[in-house]
Amino acid sequence: MKDLLDFDNLKSHIIFANETGDEETFHQADLVQLFPYGLSVTTDVSRPFLLLKDEAHQYTLPVAVSPIEAGVALSQSNRSIAESTPHRFTQLLMASLDIEIKQAVFVEIKGANQYVRLYLSGHPKTNSIKLRADEAMSLCLHLGTPIFATKNFIGRSRVMNAEVDRNAPALQSLNLSGDRSGYLN
């Protein structure tokens, strides 16, 4: 317990023991196409999960997103209101430059973060970009970008999310900010 309370030596490997740090290699035939299924809010409301499932509902990939990204994804999926998205400018800019995101593939897990590689066409210098998944999901959903992962990645993500859920109460009980109320001032 003393090691856990030693804030100077607190490192992610204490909490997340299964970090890979290597980008997954794959063949197109190894990929499972995933579709948005829902949003799950666990006991840690600061870390909602976007749930992606394959067409047969055999595989589920939980993707941790920020509350803002979750809100954008929810508002974009509500067909009963006029479309509103912060991604409109990005969509128009990409279209004006003839750049298209062909597919998004989950490729890496580092600590509590999943990474996705966006494969581009039409860009003169770059054919792919790797981003944290929580920074790209609502854009991919808005653009209708096909989303893929390997079965191995889906399994490792489920383990990672179980570890996050298991450690969330312990991390929330630690007051890392001192006596602050949580406000900026």
Image: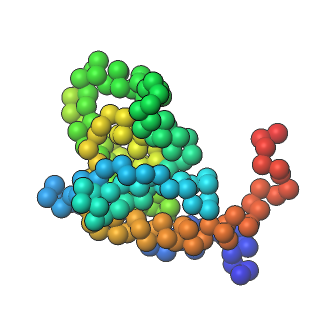
Q: Quadrant of residue 90?
A: top left
Q: Residue at x 73, y 73 (%)?
A: 5
Q: Position of residue 118 (x, y in %)?
A: 30, 43
Numbered disc total:
0
Q: Quadrant of residue 159?
A: bottom left
Closer to us: 42 or 147: 42
Q: Residue furthest right?
A: 179
Q: Quadrant of residue 1?
A: bottom right
* Image position of 129 (left or right of 181): left
* Image position of 5 (left or right of 125): right
Q: Answer above or below: position of 86 versus 156.
A: above
| Color theme of the render | rainbow
Q: Residue at x 21, y 58 (%)?
A: 31
Q: Position of residue 74 (x, y in %)?
A: 48, 41
Q: Answer above or below: position of 49 versus 96.
A: below
Q: Residue furthest left?
A: 29
Is residue 100 in view from this perspective? Answer: yes
